[in-house]
């Protein structure tokens, strides 16, 4: 099926961000990259803000499509464990345009919402509160007892969110320092994060 002109424009805009950063995104640069006139671009995107918001939705949608491909289906057909597994595996080999746009969205609630929708569907939420301290955590404990809570196993309910944080860390690390891992090293790290997240799900 032939791609729509709008999709071609957004793909051109993605290439510009990938290559030159978000600040390089102008009507002139996108029109040149897409092989269109500025008037043709204005027909689809009346303002740069419209184009940038559409780009956030386009790239975040591609990220979600990557997770659907990893999982073998849409999020609503999956268990929380399967969604987390796909989220972790999609953290490999990050795209520079994804990173730059996600960071840029922090100052724009509408753009942030495009990424939040994907996060909310695929990744576990932050814990609602920390577990209550035990008697061994009190300030009056002896030095010999103070390390007991540090040595205990983490709450299994926290493990999926810890795995999400680890996957996010891998994603950012590879985006900022590409080429540091071999395929085998990356696969080992990813499987360790998957195993961590699976510890919080009895099924799926």
Image: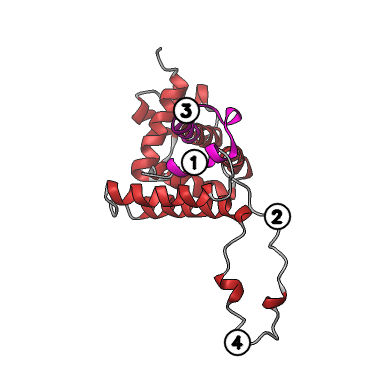
| Front-lying residue, 158 or 69 | 158
Q: Earlier in the sequence, mark 3 or mark 4?
A: 3
Residue 142, disc: none
Q: Earlier in the sequence, mark 2 or mark 4?
A: 2
Residue 128, disc: 2
Q: CA distance from mark 1 to mark 2?
A: 22 Å
Residue 59 x %, y %: 47, 35
Q: CA distance from mark 3 to mark 1?
A: 11 Å
Point out the stretch of residues depicted in magenta. Answer: 63-89
Residue marked by disc 4: 143
Q: Would you say residue 36 is visible in this rendering? A: yes
Q: Is residue 47 placed above or below 137 in the rendered structure?
A: above
Q: Is residue 5 placed above or below 77 in the rendered structure?
A: above
Residue marked by disc 3: 72
Residue 198 x %, y %: 52, 47
Residue 180 x %, y %: 29, 55
Name the front one of labels 1 and 2.
1
Q: CA distance from mark 2 to mark 3?
A: 30 Å
């Amino acid at each position: 099926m032939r791609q729509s002109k709008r999709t071609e424009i957004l793909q051109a805009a993605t290439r510009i961000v990938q290559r030159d950063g978000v600040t390089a995104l102008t009507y002139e640069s996108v029109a040149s990259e897409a092989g269109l006139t500025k008037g043709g671009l204005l027909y689809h995107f009346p303002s740069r803000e419209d184009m940038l918001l559409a780009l956030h939705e386009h790239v975040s949608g591609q990220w979600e499509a990557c997770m659907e491909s990893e999982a073998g289906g849409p999020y609503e057909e999956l268990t929380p464990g399967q969604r987390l597994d796909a989220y972790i595996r999609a953290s490999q080999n990050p795209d520079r345009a994804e990173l730059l746009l996600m960071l840029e969205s922090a100052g724009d609630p509408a753009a942030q919402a495009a990424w939040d929708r994907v996060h909310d569907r695929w990744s576990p939420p932050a814990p609602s509160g920390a577990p209550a301290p035990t008697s061994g955590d009190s300030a009056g404990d002896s030095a010999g007892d103070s390390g007991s809570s540090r040595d205990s196993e983490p709450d299994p309910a926290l493990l999926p969110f810890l795995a999400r944080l680890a996957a996010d860390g891998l994603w950012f690390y590879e985006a900022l320092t590409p080429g540091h891992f071999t395929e085998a090293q990356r696969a080992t790290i990813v499987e360790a994060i998957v195993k961590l997240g699976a510890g919080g799900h009895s099924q799926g």
